[in-house]
Image (cartoon, rainbow, N blue to C red):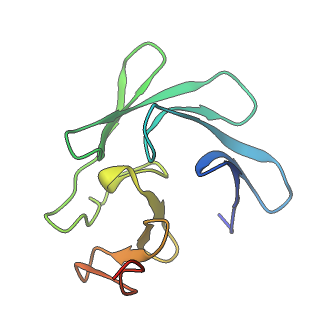
Amino acid sequence: MGPTRLLYDGQQAIGEFDQAGALLKRYVPGLGLDNVVTAYEGAGYDRRYLLADERGSVVSITDGAANALTTNTYDEYGQPGSTNSGRFQYTGQMWLTQAQLYHYRARAYAPQLGRFMQTDPIG
């Protein structure tokens, strides 16, 4: 799969498109920032619920009938398990598969290093 483009509503990602402009996923944000609760496949109604733990990490994805589709695991630094799926993962952040980084808005986090790739912008 090639690069994708994201559509934002303010600070929340609400859509993902392929290179040709075809809609791949739609995201429904929850009440807080970095809290996506539902994803739809393409323009259809194939609903996925993203279930998070106390840190906001997506630990399970279910279908519309609450059947578990996947269970996500992470090591202590947020490195995703080999069978993890979904754009949003550790602490609810966007996983950039090709870069193997999490997008934490102002900077990128490399779980394999346990480090942010930039200095904290607020000091």
Is residue 37 rendered to the left or right of residue 13? left
Locate the N terminus and report the quarter of the image it occupies.
bottom right
Q: Residue at x 45, y 31 (%)?
A: 31
Q: Residue at x 42, y 80 (%)?
A: 121
Which of these two is toward me, 58 or 24?
58
* Rendered location of residue 115, percent (x, y): 27, 81
Is residue 55 rendered to the left or right of residue 17? left
Whether residue 2 is visible: yes
Q: Residue furthest top?
A: 65
Instruction: Using the image, determine if residue 99 lies above or below residue 13.
Output: below
* Rendered location of residue 77, percent (x, y): 19, 68
* Rendered location of residue 113, percent (x, y): 25, 83
Instruction: Using the image, determine if residue 88 lies above or below residue 43.
Output: below
Which of these two is toward me, 99 or 70?
99
Instruction: Using the image, determine if residue 70 lies above or below residue 115.
Output: above
Q: Residue furthest right?
A: 20
How many numbered marks, from 0 up?
A: 0
Locate the C terminus and report the quarter of the image it occupies.
bottom left
Is residue 54 rendered to the left or right of residue 6? left
Q: Residue furthest front?
A: 123
In which quarter of the view is residue 33 placed?
top left
